[in-house]
Image (cartoon, grey):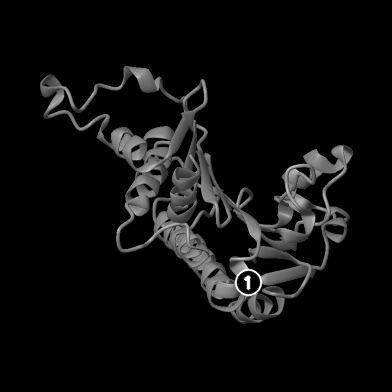
């Protein structure tokens, strides 16, 4: 059965190029220029992949929020952000058909989208002037993690949050992503992983959520204790706490929030204090 792709792009930053490359590969591609147009589509769950690249100057009415979530469209909070300076980019494969799930195919789709976004949309000068909400929703597939992690690292580097030569951010994010797929969802492709990032010149906020049973972070053996020297559990969590500026787990333990502040911002804070 032919896979279906929906692209929602209000400035044609991605839609024309991706439509051409995906159509040549045999996919059915539907494009819209606005959230409203996308919300009016029938059989939303028939799309295997939804890609949206939108300005953040329009927020959904409350009545449309649930429908927007079903359609995998991002929703911005106009009270939290300056509307004119926010972008919302999302790649969602919630409905990627499970009966003929092909991890390699999904990986290639993600890589194509992210390569085009990084090369033709995320220009250095442009990304340093906006705040962007980036979201990925996909079945548990460890092979997707490298593409997503590589994209996020390039994005925060362009904004100037980190110095790639001295930052250990890659290690923390990799640990969080792998934990979600491996320990949270136990590689079950019927379960979803959600990865989001809010990137600005001030900081990068990351959230990783899985559909697993969760865990009690307080119950993890402290790897700094000599009695736990040869235990592997707990080291990844310790890495995350040591690398990130702020770390929070939800009560269930299946949702992790991490904040990495810009080195320049931390320097200015120190000077002020």
The reply to whether residue 123 is in sight is no
Tell me the quarter of the image containing the N terminus. bottom right
Check the image and report above or below for 16 versus 255. Answer: below
The residue depicted at 52 percent of the width and 33 percent of the height is 211
Identify which residue, 87 or 101, lies in the foreground.
87
Q: Residue furthest front?
A: 272
Question: Which SS class for mark 1?
Answer: helix
Relative to residue 239, is residue 254 drawn left or right?
right
Residue 258 spot, x, y in % from top left: 47, 40
Residue 21 drawn at (x, y percent): 61, 80
State how many labels appear: 1
Residue nearer the viewer, 42 or 221 = 221
Q: Residue furthest top?
A: 219
Report crowding for label 1: few under 14, some 14 to 19, many 20 or more residues within 10 A (C-alpha): few
Left or right of 128? Residue 33 is right
Q: Nearer the viewer, residue 25 or 162?
A: 162
Q: Position of residue 219 (x, y in %)?
A: 33, 17
| Quarter-of-image position of residue 178 | top left
Residue sitting at x 68%, y 64%:
4
Q: Residue at x 85, y 54 (%)?
A: 42
Question: Relative to 121, is 129 above or below?
Answer: above
Picture coordinates of residue 248, whole percent (x, y): 48, 30
Residue 221 higher or lower than 176, as above or below: above
Residue 142 located left or right of residue 88:
left
In this figure, which residue is indicated by the disc labeled 1? 126
Q: Is residue 10 left or right of residue 214?
A: right
Task: Tell me the residue at 30%/22% (across/down).
Answer: 220
Image quarter for residue 103?
bottom left
Residue 222 placement: quadrant: top left
Q: Is residue 94 visible?
A: yes
């Amino acid at each position: 059965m032919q896979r279906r792709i929906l692209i929602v792009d209000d400035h044609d930053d991605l839609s024309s190029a991706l439509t051409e490359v995906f159509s040549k590969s045999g996919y059915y591609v539907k494009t819209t220029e606005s959230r409203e147009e996308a919300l009016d589509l029938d059989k939303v769950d028939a799309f295997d992949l939804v890609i949206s690249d939108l300005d953040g100057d329009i927020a959904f009415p409350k009545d449309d929020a649930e429908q927007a979530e079903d359609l995998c469209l991002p929703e911005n909070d106009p009270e939290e952000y300056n509307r004119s300076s926010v972008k919302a980019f999302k790649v969602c494969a919630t409905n990627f058909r499970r009966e003929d799930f092909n991890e390699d195919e999904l990986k290639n789709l993600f890589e194509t989208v992210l390569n085009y976004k990084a090369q033709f949309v995320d220009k250095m000068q442009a990304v340093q002037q906006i705040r962007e909400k980036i979201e990925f929703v996909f079945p548990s597939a460890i092979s997707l993690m490298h593409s997503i992690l590589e994209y996020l690292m390039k994005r925060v580097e362009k904004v100037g949050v980190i110095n790639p030569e001295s930052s250990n951010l890659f290690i923390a994010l990799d640990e969080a992503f792998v934990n979600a797929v491996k320990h949270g969802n136990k590689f079950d492709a019927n379960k979803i992983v959600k990865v989001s990032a809010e990137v600005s010149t001030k900081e990068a906020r990351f959230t990783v959520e899985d559909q697993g049973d969760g865990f009690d972070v307080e119950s993890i053996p402290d790897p700094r204790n000599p009695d736990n020297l040869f235990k592997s559990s707990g080291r990844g969590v310790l890495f995350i706490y040591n690398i990130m500026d702020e770390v929070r787990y939800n009560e269930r333990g299946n949702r992790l929030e991490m904040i990495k502040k810009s080195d320049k911002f931390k320097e200015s804070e120190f000077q002020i204090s």
